[in-house]
Image (cartoon, rainbow, N blue to C red):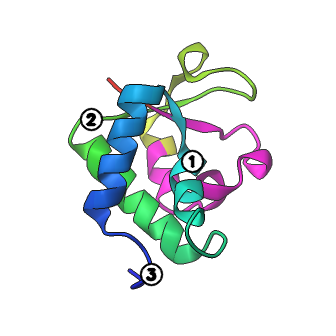
Amino acid sequence: MSDDLPPVAEVTAWLVDALANEGDQGLWEVVWSLNLDSSPSSPEKVALARQVVFTLLREGRVVLRTAPWPKAADEGRALTDGEVALLADTDTPWFDPENAGEFIVWLTMP
């Protein structure tokens, strides 16, 4: 990770707090939160967001859901295993929801 990015633990703490206190978060909001203090979205920011989200997913602390815009996460469905795997290689849903097509992903707490 780049030296100008916050540590994984800091981003994880931010995301867990946001989910607990603000509710569902768009997948892109993790990367956008990193844009507040530095340059626009970058591959390094997407990689950091991906690391945080996939770790929380493996730990059972988040659920990934999809719903067509502008519906909320609770109006959608859980991602399939194949869709979760696709997020490992697809960057657009991580920073550009307007161009993610039907692949709008929300993070929710279990």
Residue occupying image coordinates x 36% and y 57%: 11
* Magenta-tinted stretch: 84-107
Q: Earlier in the sequence, mark 1 or mark 3?
A: 3
Residue occupying image coordinates x 77% and y 43%: 101
90 vs 75, nearest the viewer: 75
Q: Residues within 10 Å of mark 2 (few under 14, many from 20)?
A: some
Residue 54 in view (yes/no): no
Could you tell me residue 8's position as x and y percent? 30, 64
Asked where in the image residue 106 lies, by quadrant, the reply is: top right
Q: Which mark is residue 61?
A: 2
Judged left or right of residue 102, residue 31 is left
Asked whether 55 falls inside the magenta stretch, the response is no
Residue farthest front in this picture: 37
Q: Which residue is mark 3?
A: 4
Between marks 1 and 3, how big is the CA–CA gap?
18 Å
Q: Is there a contact, CB below 8 Å, between mark 1 and mark 2?
A: no
Asked whether 104 falls inside the magenta stretch, the response is yes
Q: Which mark is residue 101?
A: none
Residue occupying image coordinates x 59% and y 64%: 35
Query: Which three-letter amino acid code belongs to the residue tagged 2?
Result: Arg
Residue farthest top in this picture: 75
Q: Which residue is mark 1?
A: 29
